[in-house]
Each structure stands twice: as structure tokens, then as C-alpha cells.
């Protein structure tokens, strides 16, 4: 009987254990850096909206092009006529219209094609922004969680130091100010932990929203580094930016669009030519057979219709407006290029400086770790006390956090530089 009870209890414990494990598995999601970026791009409403705008721009270009394609219309009409037929209602009619030459409309059509390209580039620019946000959130979340773990270790060390200091103060070996100083250090560490926990919640919420992870699931991240990039001189980075920058491509397409508009408006002084055709079926109840010597039921008209402008007030104003808009676009493109060249030079310099900062932080951490090993050996031999050892551990953790901060700052600068040079999407392919 007792044995059966033990079996039942053991079985229940196993079931609860597996249920708890399954629940833990369901409430956490493990992501890699590339996986987080891919999910963010896939689920981003901003990217979907940008792609929808591309579709709208393409359809707009199609509407502008439609006047240069065949347009066929049909219909019918009926009317009562008393006396001479003043109108020409037809039982059935078929009309064909196709614009052969119309410079202003062709300029608008070419401009709309270029602006569709601008929207495609804008969709890529929005995608790059989402990649930057997702990668930054992922990397910072990993850094913050590592810092929290280090601070919790610091809190334990500071509590040990505070305990030793109180004990020495009771024995008259330390002043009370040293106790207060030790307690202040512990309080500052606790304050910093609370701040980082708040930042962790904000980053996890942002990353969850970007990746489409269900609410309530914890996102597990790993400390990762960006793929190594070849060392490139500043001049090469500037050339790469000029060739790949999405902002510059957009400015160039806008300049081309306004060139097409200006060319089209200048063509407004020239004739417009349309190819037209018409087929109609007339009936006798409109008295055509009584007033015309010959009645023809089936009628066809095919020809070209030309309109020659003699005096068009709008054309001169439209040309001046298009010329002004083109001049503004050219100035804007030059300014954007100059600004991007300055930005990439600044970012390249900053990236090199942050790389040097990281190396300094790495060596400071290595020195602190070696100091801890030395003091640990001395403590084991009884040649130093616990407070000195814990102080060294505090310093080691502090150097660890400085190293993490330096590494994340370098990664952030790398991401910004990749985005400016138009390479960020390639890195996460």
C-alpha cells in the first residue's frame, strides 16, 4: 500500500516537473541576432506600409502611361428628331483614342516612373532602419543582462565588505564613516540594478514588438558580435557611400524626375498629336435619309488629330516652375552628398576611436582579473583580508561593465556606418 502511494506521488512529481518545464519552454523564446533582425523585417508594419506605397507609386505611373496606350470606348444613344437632325445619336458606336505625341504628359509619365523608384528606395531605407533598431535592441539587451549579472555579484561583494567594515567598527578598528561609505556603495549598486532592470524591460518590450513575439514571453538573447568587416580607408568608405547611399539615390531620382517634367513642359510649345478612330451605326428614324442625298448606315472615321498651340499662357509659367523645381533638386542633391561625405568621415573616425576605447577597456579588465587572482592567492595564504579581495572583485566587475559598454558603443557605431554606406542589409542576409 505504501509502495503504491510512493509510485503515485513519484508519478505526480514527474508530471508536474515536465509540466513546469513545458510551461517554462512556452513562456520564453530564444533568438539569435540574425533571427531577431529577420523577424523584425518580416513583421514590421512600417516595411509593409512602405511596400504598399511602392505599389501605389507604380499604379500612378501606370495611370500616367495609359494615355499613350490604345483606349477603346463603346456606347449607344437614341433621340427624337423633328426637322433637320441637329445631333448624331448612334445605335452603336466604337471610339479609339491614342495619344501619339504630348510632351507635357510624357514628362509627367517619366517623372512618375522615377518617383516610383524613389518609393522603392524608401522601402529599402525603412527596412534598413528596422534592421538597425532590431540589431541595436538585441545587442543592448544582451549587454544590459550581462551588466545586471555583474552588478548582482557586485552587490554580494559590497554586502560582504559592509559586513566586515561594521565588524571592524564595533571592534574600534574602523571609523563609522567607513561603514557609511560601504553602505553607500551597496546602495548605489542596488540603485544601478533597478535602473538597468527598467532598461531591460523597455528593451525587451521593444524587441518583442519588433519581432512579433507574443506578450508575456521572455526573449532569450546571447552576447554576439557583428560579422567582421574588412578594414577600409576613409576615402574608400566615402566612395562606397556615394555609390550605395539610399538617400543619394533618392535625391538623384528626384532630380531626374524634375528634369523630365521640365523637358515635357518645354515641349508644350509643340503640337500634340492623337490617333483617333470612330465607328458608328446610324438609323433612319433621325431623318438622315430625308435630308442627305445618300444615307450610310455604317460609318467609319480614322485619322490623326493635331493641336497646335498659338498662345498658351500656362506653358511659359509651367516651364519657369519646372526650372525652379529642378534647380532646387540639384542644390538639395549636392547638399545631401556633401553632408553624407562629412557624416561617413565622422562615423569612420568615431568607429576607430571606439575600437581603441574597447581595447583599452579589455586591457583594464585583464589587469583587474590578474589582480583578483593575485589577491585570491594571497588570501588563501592568509596574507590579505576578505575586504581587500572583495574590493578587487568589485573593481573587476566594474571593468567588466566598462568593457561591455565600450563593446556596445563600437557595435552601435558600426551599425550606423553600415547604414550610411548602404551595407547593413547585406550583413544580415
Image (spheres, helix red, strand yellow):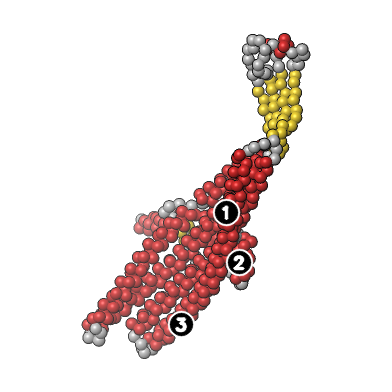
**Considering depth in this image, is 52 or 163 the residue closer to the camera?**
52
- Whether 92 is drawn above or below 316: the answer is above
- Mark 3 burial class by Cα count in 10 Å: few <14, some 14-19, many 20+: some
* Residue marked by disc 1: 328
Q: Residue 185 sits in which quadrant?
A: bottom left
Measure the C-alpha gap from mark 2 to mark 1.
24 Å
Say which quadrant the C terminus sits in: bottom right
- The residue under the point 72% across, 32% down is 305
Cα separation between marks 2 and 3: 38 Å
> Could you tell me how many numbered marks the image carries?
3
Disc 2 element: helix
Quarter assignment of residue 393: bottom left
Please tell me whether mark 2 or mark 1 is closer to you in this view: 1
Does residue 19 show up?
no
Instruction: Name the foreground residue: 249 vs 201.
Output: 249
Residue 290 in sight: yes
Per the image, the residue denoted by label 3 is 367
The local crowd at label 2, few if under 14, some if 14 to 19, many if 20 or more residues have their Cα within 10 Å, is: many
Which residue is drawn at the image coordinates 49% and 64% (left, top)? 139
The residue located at (22%, 86%) in the rendering is 172
Q: Earlier in the sequence, mark 2 or mark 1?
A: 2
Q: What secondary structure is marked by label 3? A: helix
Q: Residue 417's x, y, as percent? A: 55, 65
Contact? badges 2 and 3 (CB < 8 Å): no
Name the residue rendered at 74%, 32% in the picture: 304
256 up-or-down from 345: above or below? above
Query: Which mark's residue is nearer the viewer, 3 or 1?
Result: 1
User: Sequence-wise, which precedes: disc 2 or disc 3?
Assistant: 2
Q: Which mark is residue 275?
A: none
Q: Give the camera-side residue of 245 and 306.
A: 306
Rendering quarter of residue 341? bottom right
Q: Gap in Å between the C-alphas at discs 3 and 1?
A: 58 Å
Amino acid at each position: 500500500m505504501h509502495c503504491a502511494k510512493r509510485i503515485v506521488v513519484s508519478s505526480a512529481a514527474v508530471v508536474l516537473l515536465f509540466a513546469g518545464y513545458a510551461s517554462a519552454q512556452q513562456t520564453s523564446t530564444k533568438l539569435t541576432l540574425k533571427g531577431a533582425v529577420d523577424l523584425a523585417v518580416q513583421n514590421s508594419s512600417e516595411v509593409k506600409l512602405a511596400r504598399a506605397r511602392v505599389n501605389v507609386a507604380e499604379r500612378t505611373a501606370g495611370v500616367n502611361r495609359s494615355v499613350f496606350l490604345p483606349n477603346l470606348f463603346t456606347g449607344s444613344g437614341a433621340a427624337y428628331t423633328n426637322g433637320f437632325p441637329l445631333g448624331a445619336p448612334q445605335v452603336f458606336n466604337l471610339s479609339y483614342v491614342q495619344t501619339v505625341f504630348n510632351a507635357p504628359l510624357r514628362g509627367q509619365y517619366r517623372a512618375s516612373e522615377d518617383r516610383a523608384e524613389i518609393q522603392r528606395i524608401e522601402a529599402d531605407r525603412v527596412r534598413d532602419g528596422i534592421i538597425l533598431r532590431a540589431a541595436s535592441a538585441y545587442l543592448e539587451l544582451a549587454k544590459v543582462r550581462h551588466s545586471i549579472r555583474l552588478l548582482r555579484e557586485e552587490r554580494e561583494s559590497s554586502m560582504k565588505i559592509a559586513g566586515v567594515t561594521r565588524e571592524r567598527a564595533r571592534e574600534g578598528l574602523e571609523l563609522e564613516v567607513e561603514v557609511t561609505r560601504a553602505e553607500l556603495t551597496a546602495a548605489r549598486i542596488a540603485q544601478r540594478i533597478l535602473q538597468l532592470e527598467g532598461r531591460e524591460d523597455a528593451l525587451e518590450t521593444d524587441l518583442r514588438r519588433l519581432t512579433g513575439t507574443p506578450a508575456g514571453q521572455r526573449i532569450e538573447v546571447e552576447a554576439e558580435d557583428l560579422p567582421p568587416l574588412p578594414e577600409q580607408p576613409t576615402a574608400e568608405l566615402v566612395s562606397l557611400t556615394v555609390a550605395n547611399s539610399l538617400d543619394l539615390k533618392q535625391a538623384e531620382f528626384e532630380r531626374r524626375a524634375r528634369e523630365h517634367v521640365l523637358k515635357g513642359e518645354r515641349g508644350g510649345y509643340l503640337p500634340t498629336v492623337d490617333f483617333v478612330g470612330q465607328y458608328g451605326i446610324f438609323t433612319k428614324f433621325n431623318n438622315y435619309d430625308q435630308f442627305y442625298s445618300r444615307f450610310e448606315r455604317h460609318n467609319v472615321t480614322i485619322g490623326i488629330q493635331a493641336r497646335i498651340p498659338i498662345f498658351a499662357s500656362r506653358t511659359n509659367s509651367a516651364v519657369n516652375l519646372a526650372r525652379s523645381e529642378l534647380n532646387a533638386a540639384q542644390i538639395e542633391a549636392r547638399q545631401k552628398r556633401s553632408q553624407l561625405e562629412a557624416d561617413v568621415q565622422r562615423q569612420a573616425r568615431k568607429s576607430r576611436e571606439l575600437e581603441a576605447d574597447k581595447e583599452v577597456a579589455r586591457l583594464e579588465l585583464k589587469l583587474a582579473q590578474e589582480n583578483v587572482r593575485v589577491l585570491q592567492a594571497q588570501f588563501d595564504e592568509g596574507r590579505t583580508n576578505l575586504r581587500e579581495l572583495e574590493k578587487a572583485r568589485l573593481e573587476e566587475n566594474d571593468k567588466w561593465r566598462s568593457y561591455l559598454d565600450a563593446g556596445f558603443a563600437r557595435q552601435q557605431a558600426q551599425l550606423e556606418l553600415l547604414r550610411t554606406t548602404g551595407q547593413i542589409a547585406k550583413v544580415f542576409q
